[in-house]
Image: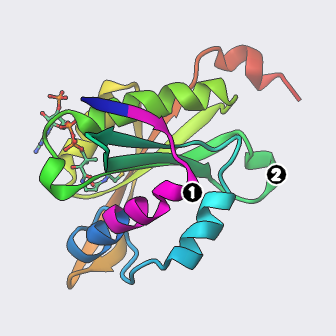
Amino acid sequence: MLTTRQATLEDLGAITEIYNEAVLKTVATFDTELKTLEEQRIWFANHVPKYPILVAERDGLIVGWASLSMWSDRRAYSDTAKISLYVKEEHQGKGIGRKLLEAIIQEGQKTGLHTVIARIAEGSEASIHLCESVGFEHIGIMKEVGRKFGKLLDVHLMQKIYNNPVASRNTT
Ligand SMILES: CC(C)(COP(=O)(O)OP(=O)(O)OC[C@H]1O[C@@H](n2cnc3c(N)ncnc32)[C@H](O)[C@@H]1OP(=O)(O)O)[C@@H](O)C(=O)NCCC(=O)NCCS
């Protein structure tokens, strides 16, 4: 059975392993060097409580994770998050990404975020499709901003604004 839940520090090893697999094999992240557990502990500490991290667990194994991270440390951006979503390679294509995405979007609404931004490298059609399906809109393309595996890459920017934007626009 597949469940999603809040990540704990005990999950950090599995989260890091899944992320590092993507660092080595994909353009989903523009990191090119593996993350250490020490770096990841700082990343984890920067999340709670407003910026959630969820894991997907199947039969006791962490098979994917999703997070909403601070977009910027400049305080005016504090209700804006960037999304990350990773599923272990051999478990992809089985609905886990969708389940995690839907859960993390709900979680962001609960923690009071106003908007979420996705940065998706060109060619990542499944990610674009998934984001569109939960209400993200295309807001632009950053041209040739990354180079990985010897190729210059565009990045698609997508954004979801939680409901009631007019009322919250006037909130100070
Ligand atoms: C992107 C990723 C998270 C998706 O997770 P997943 O568990 O494989 O995704 P799911 O099986 O839940 O769903 C994939 C969806 O994309 C669709 N899809 C797959 N390939 C597609 C393609 N080439 N074009 C359009 N849609 C595609 C599937 O039909 C499915 O849509 P549906 O739910 O409407 O049927 C996963 O592939 C991954 O970890 N990739 C590497 C890291 C990454 O790219 N992360 C995103 C960075 S923002």
Q: In the structure shown, which secondary structural element does the residue marked by tag 1 occupy?
A: helix
Name which residue lies at 38% across and 61% down: 14
Tell me if residue 51 comes above or below residue 29 in the rendering.
above
Tell me residue 30's x, y (percent): 38, 72
Q: Position of residue 99 (x, y in %)?
A: 32, 30
Residue numbers of the magenta segment:
4-18
Residue in the foreground of this view, choosing between 63 and 66: 63
Disc 1 crowd rating (10 Å Cα; few below 14, some 14-19, many 20+) is few
The answer to whether 48 appears left or right of 137 in the picture is right
> Which circle's residue, 2 or 1, is located before the other in the chain?
1
Q: Is residue 74 magenta?
A: no
Mark identifier at residue 9:
1
User: In the picture, which quadrant includes the C terminus?
Assistant: top right
**Residue 103 in the figure: left or right of residue 78:** left
Mark 2: few/some/many CA within 10 Å (<14, 14-19, 20+): few
Q: Quadrant of ligand 1?
A: top left
Closest to the camera, between mark 2 and mark 1, is 1
As drawn, the label of residue 75 is: 2
